[in-house]
Image (tube, helix red, strand yellow):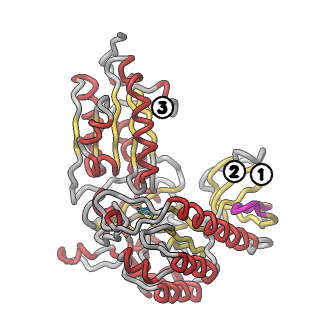
């Protein structure tokens, strides 16, 4: 067996990220901690000494992918002394030490509130071969962007709260991410200022349900609402675009709509997960709003904010969903005509109320409903895209377009991908592009002088 030198500057870490934007943000955070601690990062798994998976538990499929990746590493681990395999993220907090039963070659299990310790525990695992599980929640810890190691020079995610207290009956998040905790607003504004100073133009404020931001801060004498925080962030010098996710439709207040309508830096875009279009199923999901309430909020948003881009999450095949319930979802799609829909088959999660419901829907029915739903959603998305033809989009450039030689791509204020031809553009440039065609959900156009 080859013996690894103890020189940690030679340790290369490969990290693969599954799941939501919070995981992307947290993987960036772990990467910058590793770089600060004399590790290097590699995108090639075959060059790595350390392999980390930042995992998601939201659906079974996401977990299966990780278990299969872990299984493939048993031999890799044996080939060279000092190699380390770690699981971060939601599977760390949901399975803890039980992950080692499924993958005995696993060295590290580290939950989202323990990432500051990642460099140290990798070092210990590599030197001693002992495994460690660190999965406790820590109410005061929030990952912050490191302006010296930004993953993109012009855009950043900012975590404003963590956890969730809503306990929708299908969702594992309250268990994997713990109780809802808001980060102090001064820290968020300060981080935004630092990012703006480093050249960042767009920030996305992240939380499981941003509309309940601030509830837990009241006991500390701080009564800021999410809408007020959004306004403060939008007014930071140098910040040109602000986005946020996710908003729960139950507590989307008029005050927030007002801030979206009046603050020029807040983009005309909202992700508003509805989950389904049947009151009966919404009740069983414990979403605590009706279809009528949801449609009223959409109507208010649309009438207050011109050209608003609305996206949603939908679950098909929740326990007890009948053909009639599903038809309610299809009707809702026709009423809202979303710009994009993220659709999922219901996946039972251990420990949740819905997983124990007796009337689970057959897999074939879920497949058939998902296909019908997606067909309608794509039609609406393409029509919404076509409505941009002839319009001039303000595009924040992300970089060269892979599939269009001589092309660049970026995002419109609504968050649509826009591709255009040109020379010498850099990430962070803002250009005006007149749209002359679209392909599925992407826009193509010509730069305006
Ligand atoms: N099965 C399927 N989809 C789920 N989601 C959350 N939990 C489940 C589950 N058990 C979806 C919801 C949520 C999105 C992030 O993931 O639509 O809004
Ligand atoms: Fe899950 Fe519901 Fe909380 Fe969203 S609001 S994270 S779906 S429990």
Question: Tag 3 or tag 1, which sits nearer the N-term?
Answer: 3
- State if disc 1 and disc 2 touch (CB < 8 Å): yes
**Is residue 274 shown to the viewer in this render?**
yes
Please rate how many residues cluster around mark 2, counting C-alpha atoms within 10 Å: few if below 14, some from 14 to 19, many from 20: some
Is residue 443 a member of the stretch shown in magenta?
Answer: yes
The residue lying at 33 percent from left, 36 percent from top is: 86
Image quadrant in which the C terminus is located? bottom right
Mark 2 or 3, closer to the camera: 3
Provide the major secondary structure of the magenta segment: strand
Q: State the SS at label 1.
A: loop
Determine whether the beta carbon of the residue marked 2 sits less than 8 angstroms from the nearest atom of ligand 1.
Answer: no
Residue, disc 2 = 425
Mark 1 or 3, closer to the camera: 3
Gap in Å between the C-alphas at discs 1 and 3?
31 Å
The residue lying at 57 percent from left, 60 percent from top is: 367
* 401 shown above or below 1: below
Gap in Å between the C-alphas at discs 2 and 3?
27 Å
Q: Position of residue 235 (x, y in %)?
A: 46, 73
Q: State the SS at label 3.
A: loop
Task: Using the image, tell me which numbered label, if any, was put on residue 422.
Answer: 1
Q: Position of residue 362 (x, y in %)?
A: 49, 62
Determine whether the beta carbon of the residue marked 1 sits less than 8 angstroms from the nearest atom of ligand 1.
Answer: no
Q: State the SS at label 2.
A: loop
Viewer-closest of 197 and 389? 389
Residue, disc 3 = 42
Viewer-closest of 255 and 82? 82
Question: Tag 3 or tag 2, which sits nearer the N-term?
Answer: 3
Q: Which residues are magenta?
A: 438-445
Quadrant of the displayed image that contains ligand 2: bottom left
Instruction: Tell me the quarter of the picture where residue 441 sits.
Output: bottom right
Image quadrant in which the N terminus is located? top left
């Amino acid at each position: 067996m080859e013996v690894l030198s103890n020189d940690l500057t030679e340790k290369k870490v490969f990290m693969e990220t599954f799941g939501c934007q919070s995981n992307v943000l947290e993987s960036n955070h772990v990467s910058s901690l590793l770089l600060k601690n004399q590790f290097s990062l590699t995108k090639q798994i075959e060059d790595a000494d350390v392999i980390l998976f930042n995992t998601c538990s939201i659906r079974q499929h996401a977990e299966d992918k990780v278990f299969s990746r872990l299984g493939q590493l048993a031999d890799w681990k044996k080939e060279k002394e000092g190699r380390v395999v770690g699981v971060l993220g939601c599977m760390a907090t949901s399975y803890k030490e039980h992950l080692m039963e499924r993958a005995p070659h696993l060295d590290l299990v580290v939950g989202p509130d323990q990432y500051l310790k990642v460099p140290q525990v990798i070092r210990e695992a590599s030197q001693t071969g002992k495994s460690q599980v660190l999965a406790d929640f820590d109410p005061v810890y929030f990952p912050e962007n490191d302006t010296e190691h930004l993953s993109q020079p012009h855009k950043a995610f900012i975590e404003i709260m963590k956890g969730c207290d809503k306990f929708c009956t299908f969702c594992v998040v309250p268990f994997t991410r713990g109780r809802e905790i808001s980060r102090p607003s001064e820290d968020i504004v300060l981080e935004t200022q630092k990012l703006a100073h480093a050249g960042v133009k767009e920030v996305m404020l992240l939380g499981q349900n941003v509309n309940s931001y601030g509830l837990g801060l009241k006991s500390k004498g701080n009564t800021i609402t999410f809408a007020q925080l959004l306004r403060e962030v939008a007014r930071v010098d140098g910040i040109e675009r602000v986005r946020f996710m996710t908003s729960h439709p139950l507590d989307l207040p008029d005050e927030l709509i007002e801030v979206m309508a009046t603050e020029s830096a807040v983009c005309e875009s909202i992700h508003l997960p509805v989950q389904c279009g049947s009151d009966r199923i919404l009740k069983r999901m414990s979403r605590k709003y009706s279809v009528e309430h949801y449609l009223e909020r959409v109507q208010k948003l649309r009438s207050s904010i011109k050209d608003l881009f609305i996206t949603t999450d939908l679950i098909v095949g929740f326990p007890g969903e009948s053909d009639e319930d599903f038809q309610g979802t299809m009707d809702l799609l026709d009423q809202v005509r979303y710009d994009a829909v993220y659709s999922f088959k219901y996946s039972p999660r251990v420990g949740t109320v819905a997983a124990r419901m007796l009337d689970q829907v057959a897999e074939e029915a879920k497949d058939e409903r998902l296909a019908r739903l997606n067909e309608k959603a794509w039609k609406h998305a393409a029509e919404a895209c076509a409505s941009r033809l002839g319009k001039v989009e303000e595009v924040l450039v992300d970089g060269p377009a892979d599939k269009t030689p001589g092309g660049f791509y970026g995002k419109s204020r609504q968050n649509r991908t826009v591709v255009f031809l040109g020379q010498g553009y850099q990430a962070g440039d803002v250009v005006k592009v007149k749209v002359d065609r679209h392909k599925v959900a992407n826009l193509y156009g010509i730069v305006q002088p």
